[in-house]
Amino acid sequence: MPIVSIFALVNLFFWGLATWKFYSVYKETKDKKVGYLYKGFFSFSISLVFLFYAGGITRNLKIIDLIYDVYTFFTIAGQAFLVNITFEILRWEKIKRIVFFTLVLAGAVVAIVPTLNMNSAQVSQEGPFVFWEDTRGAFMNTLMGMTMMFSGLWFFLFFLIKGLAAKDNIVKAKGILMSGGMFFMILLGLVDYIIGPFFGILHISLFTVLCGLSAALCFFSAVHYKKTIQPI
């Protein structure tokens, strides 16, 4: 049973639903912050499509390894769009462009460089569950995790501080929910890409799917808290 593909499909349902909802809100409001949220969720959803396809549709080990390399670009691009929200609020246009370009470049490096090895994915099994593991190596996985963590940390602190400092309870709740969503993304980056090799792959897979679902729920709740339709 390709458990990672199943987990990816479960996450894809919720992230895809949220993407569609955010897009609907963006079309209605034309709010750039909601637009970045929609684009971020759309990028994460593309990552999940790749993860489902690898094992859920194809069992070719070379294709699976290639997919495991490429999907990381869309994960980091999604993170970059979310970070853009903070600079849009601050109206730091130049910094926003620089940070976005830097993150996208890091995503391209993490995605493209490992494809050059043309390896086959590694297969492992725990009980009835089959897993396919990438061959990116520790350095690229660490770069991936650190990119998610450091960019996410800025987002997390920005919304946490903004939320706690707000006098309006709705703004306070939205800020805490937005920071909560990124907190789970930071955990995902830390556990899945940096410390994951030290734990059983089944436990890591369960933990990361819960982080992904929790992040989607927090972001979705932040936008729609008290029937308002803006992140903060």
Image: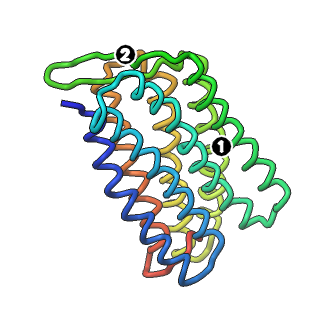
- The label on residue 208 is none
Amino acid carrying mark 1 in the image: Ser
Instruction: Relative to 159, say whether 77 is above or below.
Output: above
Residue 55 on image: x %, y %: 30, 32
Instruction: Relative to 6, say whether 131 is above or below.
Output: above
Q: Which quadrant is the N terminus positioned in?
A: top left
Residue 51 on image: x %, y %: 38, 38
Residue 119 on image: x %, y %: 47, 15
Residue 92: name its quadrant.
Answer: bottom right
Question: Label 2: which residue?
Answer: 122
Residue 140 on image: x %, y %: 59, 22
Residue 205: name its quadrant.
Answer: top left
Instruction: Relative to 18, say whether 126 is above or below.
Output: above
The residue nearer to you, when weighing 112 against 35, is 112
What is the number of callouts on the image?
2
Q: Is residue 158 left or right of residue 130?
A: right
Question: Label 1: which residue?
Answer: 151
- Residue depth check, mark 2 versus mark 1: number of the one nearer the observer: 2
Whether pointer 2 and pointer 1 mark residues with C-beta atoms closer than 8 Å, the reply is no
Q: Is residue 27 left or right of residue 198?
A: right
The residue nearer to you, when weighing 5 against 99, is 5
The residue nearer to you, when weighing 179 against 209, is 209
- Tell me the residue at 29%/27% (across/down): 59
Given the current orientation, which residue lies at the most extreme bottom position? 28
Q: Which quadrant is the C terminus positioned in?
A: bottom right
Amino acid carrying mark 2 in the image: Gln
